[in-house]
Image (cartoon, helix red, strand yellow):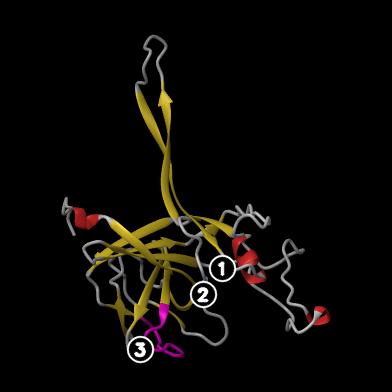
Amino acid sequence: MPRQNDAGELLKKITALTLFRLQTGTVGDTTTTAPVLGTGAETSVAVTAITNFTAADPCFIIGDGGLELTLIGTPNVTMPVSPPPKIAQSTGARFVEAVAVTLGKIAQGSVKWSANRALTAVFEEVGDTPVCYIPGTLECGLDFALYGYNGPNVQLLTGYLEAETGSGAALATAYQSLIGGVNQALQTAQVFRVQALRYDAKNIQIDFLNVQIAAAINSDLSRMNASTLNGSVKASAMIIRQYL
């Protein structure tokens, strides 16, 4: 949607922060049989098989164009998808079931996204100002803080696969989450989705695609402040949507 240039475009509040990752176990996992055009208008993706897919599943499309998150309708080899894919992919891209992970309570004022590109100045011997600038890599990031003080959140925010043991009934069976074990499993493909609401009642959705965790926990354990677990991620791409 084009710029409205009015007060309604102001962001009112964050309504959700959700993590999507590869589903484990017996899951839908197939490949595309035709290119994904990435026009933002396709309502379906042609796939090889529909085994183990279920209506309303979140799914990743992973191919030479990168990674994208979508939701499916009733499974079919002409797989209905929404929102329409925005990233072009060649035939043979992986189409795989994902799962949404609710992260719990989010610390007020902690959700921030950034996009930074460093510029390198090119100088000549005589002039005092740059001849031009060489653009560097664009880095997109998301920062947030969680109130949930638990092992899975610590593993998540340090880049490890969540693998908690125990029942928590007593010290002998305590919940335990390892950080930094030898050959400890790292996280797989992930997407963070921020959902927000504007003052004109339009929804804003930002997908941070194929993220990597940049560990940034600096938790205050004093009684003076609410303790949080800080999260910071870097994304290889972003998709921003606006809708009613």
SS of the residue at dot 1?
A: loop
Quarter placement of the N terminus: bottom left
Residue denoted by label 3:
75
Residue denoted by label 1:
188
Amino acid at circle 2: Leu
239 up-or-down from 84: above or below: above
Callouts 2 and 1 close, C-beta under 8 Å: yes
Amino acid at circle 1: Thr
Residue 129 locus on image (x, y percent)? 36, 17
Callouts 3 and 1 close, C-beta under 8 Å: no
**Residue drawn at the location 51% of the way across and 75% of the way down:** 22
Residue denoted by label 2:
22
Toward which corner of the image does residue 128 lie, by quadrant? Answer: top left
Foreground: 116 or 124? 116
Q: Which residues are magenta?
A: 47-58
Residue 28 locus on image (x, y percent)? 47, 84
Res. 186 in view: no
112 up-or-down from 196: above or below: above
SS of the residue at dot 2?
A: strand
**Residue drawn at the location 65% of the way across and 54% of the way down:** 220
Q: From mark 2 to mark 1, how far is it between C-alphas?
A: 7 Å
Quarter placement of the C terminus: bottom left
Which residue in the rendered view is the most extreme toward the top? 126
Amino acid at circle 3: Pro
Name which of mark 3 and mark 1 comes first in the sequence. Answer: 3
